[in-house]
């Protein structure tokens, strides 16, 4: 995995996480899991976080007339950013 090699060369910790381990059916759990991930990354800094399957949470943007509608799936994306 290229990102793991880059982290090793840079002397950084490497965290590989898939979206299936972050996502949850319970309200607020995704945000809590993402916060915990970045808290761990801060403790072992410098860190490279590789998020596999990130496209699984990206919703669709659609236009309804003049307005841009974004699905609720963007909430975890905002938390990641």
Image (spheres, helix red, strand yellow):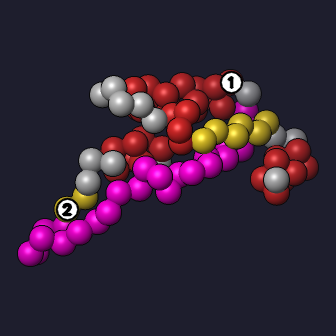
Magenta run includes residue 8: no
Q: Is residue 52 above or below residue 40?
A: below
Count numbered badges in the picture: 2
Q: Is residue 29 above or below residue 12?
A: above
Q: Residue at x 39, y 26 (%)?
A: 29
- Is 48 positioned to the left or the right of 27 in the image? right
Q: Which residue is mark 2?
A: 69
- Secondary structure state at the residue bearing disc 2: strand
The magenta region covers 45-68
**Residue 26 shows in the view:** yes
List the single residue furthest toward the left: 65
List the single residue furthest toward the bottom: 65
Mark 1 or 2: the one toward you: 2
Q: Is residue 60 above or below residue 4?
A: below
Residue 31, given in percent of the width and then of the height, sits at 41, 32
Q: Residue at x 48, y 44 (%)?
A: 80
Q: Which residue is mark 1?
A: 43
């Amino acid at each position: 995995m290229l990102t793991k090699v880059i982290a090793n060369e840079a002397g950084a910790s490497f965290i590989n996480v898939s979206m299936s381990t972050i996502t949850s059916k319970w309200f607020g759990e995704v945000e809590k899991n993402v916060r915990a991930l970045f808290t761990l990354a801060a403790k072992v800094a410098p860190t490279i976080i590789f998020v596999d399957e990130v496209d699984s949470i990206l919703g669709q943007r659609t236009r309804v007339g003049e307005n841009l509608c974004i699905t609720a799936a963007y909430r975890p994306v905002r938390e990641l950013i």
